[in-house]
């Protein structure tokens, strides 16, 4: 029976790792990995980070080939930023349920209902959607991007409704919101959070703003029902920074379980409790060590974006990077 793997790290065979290193040199390649990748993929990567860090790293690397260990929209963003490099994704099926929740055609129809509105697209979108947008944002800079838009302008914020509610609460700006969600974070409900927090009452609480619990957490924070100074709504990289720098010894973590790998590495003496062990993005987990090797050997799968589309999508990404 084909059983799905848990999020746990598996030590790859040393000869496989050596082979990857050899091919990496041969191809003048760099391996970039998202914080949700399996631990063994993170360990062999040259750079591990959140969506913002990965796009910044892609833009700055002088390697000829980028092996992108993440999901398709991330590799596509790297291809837009690096038209002269070859961007590879080890599995073309590594998609994103959130990015799939809006098409360019749907966005054009939505824009037609709100002429003159500024469009802010989360980075978890296709190149076609980015090309129809004014700004891109990630979970680490969404507030900053919205705050940079003149207060008299209408804003269409897409596609994540939970991130939108977070940004609205922080900035006070009214946002027209697309009803999209990520299936992994939508499953982290207020009930799951209540259970996890009750099990670890002294722990700090870190939440990704895509979680469906984020709206109720903001509400409880505003009411004083949960302590503001022990609750942190952050991107994956923001969570990693906080857990390293905090003097706290225990953390309840509401996001995909892959992020715990670097948390343990960065703070080996601290304790980390995922809200749910089942919070696994099976798209992220399609990337395996064997597929990374094949990707380098066979130069597959090349991710390209047509130059005219890339140029339009790049405007939204560059506007975000200028603010980052
Ligand atoms: P981060 O940018 O916080 O890493 O989030 C990316 C993502 O896909 C979350 O589901
Ligand atoms: Fe997309 Fe959700 Fe997976 Fe992130 S965790 S890549 S938003 S499906």
Image: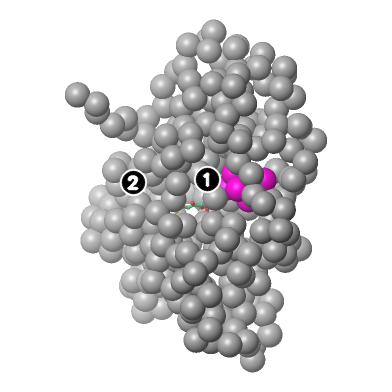
**Which residue is located at x 65 percent, y 17 percent?**
23
Point out the image quarter for the N terminus: top left
Mark 2 C-beta closer than 8 Å to ligand 2: no
204 lies left or right of 84? left
Q: On screen, 119 above or below 324?
A: below
Work out whether residue 119 or residue 166 is closer to the camera in this orientation and state it: 119
Instruction: Residue at the far right: name it.
Output: 62
Work out whether residue 42 or residue 244 is closer to the camera in this orientation and state it: 42
Quadrant of the rendered image containing residue 94? top left
> Residue 100 placed where, x, y %?
43, 57
The residue to which callout 2 is attached is 279
Q: Nearer the viewer, mark 1 or mark 2?
A: 1
Residue 72's disc is: 1
> Residue 79 placed where, x, y %?
67, 46
Q: Name the dominant secondary structure of the magenta segment.
A: helix
Mark 1 C-beta closer than 8 Å to ligand 2: no
**Which residue is located at x 62 percent, y 87 percent?**
116
**Which residue is located at x 57 percent, y 25 percent?**
295
Q: Secondary structure at mark 1?
A: helix
Point out the image quarter for the C terminus: bottom right
Based on the picture, tell me whether residue 77 belongs to the magenta stretch: yes
Work out whether residue 106 or residue 101 is closer to the camera in this orientation and state it: 106
Magenta part of the protein: which range?
A: 74-79
Q: Secondary structure at mark 2?
A: loop
22 lies left or right of 157? right
């Amino acid at each position: 029976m084909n059983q799905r793997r848990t999020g746990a790290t598996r030590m790859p065979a040393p000869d496989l790792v050596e082979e990857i290193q050899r091919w990496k040199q041969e191809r003048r390649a760099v391996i970039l990995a998202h914080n949700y990748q399996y631990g063994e993929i993170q360990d062999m990567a040259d750079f591990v980070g959140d969506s913002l860090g990965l796009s910044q790293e892609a833009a700055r690397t002088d390697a000829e080939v980028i092996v992108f260990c993440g999901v398709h929209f991330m590799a596509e963003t790297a291809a837009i930023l690096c038209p002269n490099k070859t961007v590879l994704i080890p599995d073309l099926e590594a998609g994103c349920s959130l990015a799939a929740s809006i098409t360019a055609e749907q966005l054009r129809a939505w824009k037609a209902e709100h002429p003159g509105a500024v469009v802010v697209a989360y980075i978890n979108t296709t190149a076609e959607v980015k090309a129809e947008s004014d700004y891109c944002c990630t979970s680490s800079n969404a507030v900053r991007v919205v705050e940079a838009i003149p207060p008299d302008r209408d804003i269409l914020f897409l596609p994540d409704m939970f991130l939108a509610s977070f940004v609205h609460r922080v900035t006070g700006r009214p946002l027209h919101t697309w009803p999209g969600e990520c299936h992994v974070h939508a499953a982290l409900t207020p009930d799951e959070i209540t259970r996890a927090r009750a099990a670890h009452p002294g722990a700090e609480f870190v939440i990704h703003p895509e979680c469906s619990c984020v709206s109720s957490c903001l509400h409880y924070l505003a009411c004083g029902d949960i302590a503001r100074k022990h609750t942190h709504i952050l991107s994956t990289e923001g969570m990693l920074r906080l857990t390293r720098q905090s003097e706290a010894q225990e953390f309840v973590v509401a996001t995909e379980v892959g992020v715990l790998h670097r948390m343990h590495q960065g703070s080996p003496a601290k304790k980390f409790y995922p809200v749910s062990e089942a919070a696994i993005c099976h798209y992220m987990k399609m990337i395996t060590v064997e597929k990374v090797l094949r990707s380098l050997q066979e130069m597959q799968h090349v991710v390209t974006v047509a130059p005219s589309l890339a140029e339009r999508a790049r405007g939204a990404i560059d506007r975000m990077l200028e603010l980052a």
